[in-house]
Image (cartoon, grey):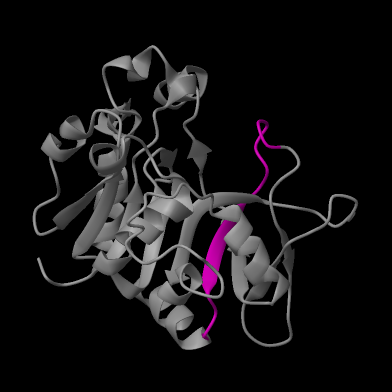
């Protein structure tokens, strides 16, 4: 249990748009094709070689802790709801968990469905050697996010760069899949002003940190062409299970 986790699974959201389904069941435990969303992600991480996964929790945390886990995978928890009375948002949650995370680690949301994504050791090795602060996987814009999030620019050598585009920039944007590789340094000064461990329980979004790092050409990215769904509404869940 003393080994640092190489992946963080974000599972602290309330799932307001999924109500009433999430009134008695945390969103990561809603079933897609007979299996909880959380389990799809954990099994994919394990296939990619992850041994330690850290999960942050808030709403109905006890159900997440009691859920089945793949054999051979060690789960650790950051109980934001218990410690601070609510979720800390993405950057706040990562900062809270930082003392338990490795120097380089995966982060992904527990409420996206990406059955074909590979958390490959080779991607981890390439990112570690790159010196970048983050590497993001972007997807084609879904109907619920037609404007996208970040741009993408090819470079002569190495992976493409993620771009923080101005609102009037005509270049295309793509949607952030929530899947990314990160270096601990992104959540430390000068990029992040939250102390490691986030002892004050500061809530903070991830996008501002990423945009600052993009402006310094410290974030790479690539397009993921495989199936991807943000399971954000009962309708999207029903469509996946149809």
Decide: is 210 above or below 189: above
Residue at image location 54% in from the left, 54% down from the top: 206
Which residue is the extreme one toward the top? 20
Identified at 16% across, 54% down, the residue is 75
Q: Is residue 136 magenta?
A: yes
Q: Is residue 48 visible?
A: no
Q: Where is the N terminus found, in terms of image quarters?
A: bottom left
Q: How many marks?
A: 0
Query: Quarter of the image containing the C terminus?
Result: top left
Above or below, 214 against 141 in this view is below
Q: Residue at x 60, y 65 (%)?
A: 222
Give the residues drawn in magenta, as a range: 131-145
Provide residue 142's location: percent of width, then percent of height: 65, 37
**The image quarter in which residue 125 lies:** bottom left
In the picture, measured across the screen, residue 85 lies left or right of residue 211, that is left
x and y percentages locating residue 98 in the rendered image: 33, 65
Q: Residue at x 17, y 30 (%)?
A: 63
Residue 28 seen in render: yes
**Going by the image, does 194 lie left or right of 140?**
left
Name the side, left or right, on which 183 lies relative to 177.
Answer: left
**Residue 179 x/y as whole percent:** 47, 55
Q: Principal SS element in the magenta part?
A: loop
**Does the stretch in magenta take in 99?**
no
Front-most of residues 17 and 82: 82
Give how far across and how far down residue 64 sits, in percent. 20, 36
């Amino acid at each position: 249990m003393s080994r640092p986790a190489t992946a963080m699974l974000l599972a602290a959201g309330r799932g307001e748009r999924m109500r009433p389904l999430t009134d008695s069941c945390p969103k990561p435990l809603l079933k897609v094709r007979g299996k909880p969303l959380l389990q799809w992600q954990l099994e994919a991480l394990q296939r990619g070689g992850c041994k330690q996964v850290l999960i942050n929790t808030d709403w109905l945390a006890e159900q997440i802790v009691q859920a089945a886990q793949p054999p051979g995978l060690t789960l650790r928890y950051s109980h934001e709801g218990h410690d601070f009375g609510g979720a800390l948002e993405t950057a706040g949650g990562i900062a809270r968990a930082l003392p338990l995370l490795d120097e380089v680690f995966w982060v992904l949301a527990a409420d996206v469905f990406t059955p074909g994504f590979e958390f490959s050791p080779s991607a981890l090795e390439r990112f570690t050697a790159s010196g970048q602060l983050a590497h993001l996987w972007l997807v084609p814009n879904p109907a619920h996010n037609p404007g996208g999030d970040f741009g993408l620019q090819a470079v002569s050598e190495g992976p493409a760069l993620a771009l923080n585009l101005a609102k009037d920039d005509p270049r295309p944007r793509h949607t952030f899949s929530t899947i990314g590789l990160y270096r601990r340094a992104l959540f430390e000064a000068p990029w992040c002003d939250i102390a490691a461990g986030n002892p004050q329980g500061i809530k903070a979004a991830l996008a501002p940190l990423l945009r600052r790092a993009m402006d310094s050409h410290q974030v790479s990215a690539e397009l993921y062409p495989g199936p991807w769904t943000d399971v954000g509404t009962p309708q999207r869940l029903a469509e996946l299970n149809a």
